[in-house]
Amino acid sequence: MEKKKTPMPEQEPFERIKNFNEVALGYDEEDAVKEAGRCLACKKPSCVKGCPVEIDIPGFISFIKERKFDEAISKIKEKNSLPAICGRVCPQETQCEELCVLGKKDEPVAIGRLERFVADWERKKGMKTPQKVVPTGKKIAVIGSGPAGLTCAADLAKLGYSVTIFESLHKTGGVLMYGIPEFRMPKAIVETEINYIQQLGVEIRTDMVVGKSIGVDELLQDFDAVFIGTGAGLPMFMHIPGENLNGVYSANEFLTRVNLMKAYRFPEYDTPVRVGKRVAVVGAGNVAMDSARTALRLGAEESLIVYRRSEKEMPARKEEVEHAKEEGVRFMLLTNPVKIFGDEYGFVKKMECIQMKLGEPDESGRRRPVPVKGSEFTVDVDTVIVAIGQNPNPLVPKTMKGLEVGKHGNIIADEDGRTSIKGVFAGGDIATGAATVISAMGMGKKAATTIDKYVMEKK
């Protein structure tokens, strides 16, 4: 029994910073079978408890051991309609893999890598057309085509509902399409997964801004229930002087321009993004790592992560931090921006920062950063990207009377997705604030079950 995970093949750092191709190359059959062989096939698998969508993890891994890859992907898709996506961006290390029994002494089984392998294997071989189910005659509207909306729609379609997704952008996929860079989540893979969901019978209408093009009240007249999964698309800012200068981006805008509008393929796509020689990214979550790594690929000579706490408190996945370091991203820790200066034309020129020290833990459990008096200093920068978090998309909640919302604009929904309005359900980042792809999928899945029960009881 190998004590460590089977290594994931990757592009070399000096090569990958020159392109937007996927960094992790995926297991081949031999790697996958070897890694699957490390699974202990526990009679009481604790790993499943860590999966928000409740995949039968030992079940699909046992099929990989026997090289029954068709059966493996079928087992996964009993619970998860987006396996190629989850295998790439789920934080397995804090979910299923964290509870792996093998991980108590050695490295846990690489569950995410195995999920990705069988999903990619199916895609290369040719996706199976899902079997049609007996229609219920009932219609459900889903607002937003991100992870929560896609999962809710897929699960309801499998139950025989006629599901229509309303997406405000011209492309389907939400944060999967606009927020995660190509080198971490190839858009062709997102499109393949979405195509599978459409084959289940889900209709998708793009360029439909619910709250402007059509209201939820109107949808309730035509549909038996409505699920809201509009995500967290409202960027947070630092509210410091100079934040409105040219060359200051929210991470949301920066990544959307690059990922959705293909700025990295200028002039083929006329949507350039200017980064200059030195880029500072404020924040240390996955979005910050994505922004800093993207800046290097766009031609920045130096990319900085500016974070007010230490590395121990970084919310980004360990893998993303390691990849950023390998690619040459520089980390300025215990540092907080206080002012951005511009040149005579209104472009970013430099940023004033202050050193921080860690005090007592705050409500998040992390030690609170405290400014060190007299430690101010300046850094020359051409671009500043603010990646300190996002609040829920406010458009739909603001246009709905009687919908209960939290202080940050999130829709208040119970653990099963019920909101304060009968027939209206919600899940994902619009309910929780910015979280992970898989947690949004888990909420979409629970809401689908609740919607099914609600509609059936209405008969």
Image: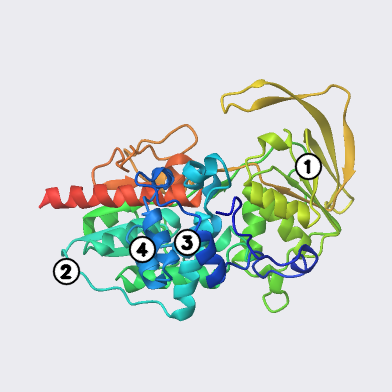
Contact? badges 3 and 1 (CB < 8 Å): no
**Compared to 319, does 205 lie above or below?**
below
Mark in front: 3 vs 4: 3
Q: CA distance from mark 1 to mark 2?
A: 59 Å
**Which residue is denoted by mark 2 in the rendering?**
134
* Mark seen at residue 77: 4
Q: CA distance from mark 3 to mark 2?
A: 29 Å
Mark in front: 3 vs 1: 3
Contact? badges 3 and 4 (CB < 8 Å): no
Q: CA distance from mark 3 to mark 1?
A: 45 Å
Out of 367 and 112, give the one closest to the viewer: 112
Is 98 positioned to the left or the right of 126 in the image? right
Say whether disc 1 or disc 2 marks the residue closer to the N-terminus.
2
Residue placed at 49% from the left, 58% from the top? Answer: 86
**Compared to 236, does 65 lie above or below?**
below
* Mark seen at residue 115: 3
Q: CA distance from mark 3 to mark 4?
A: 10 Å
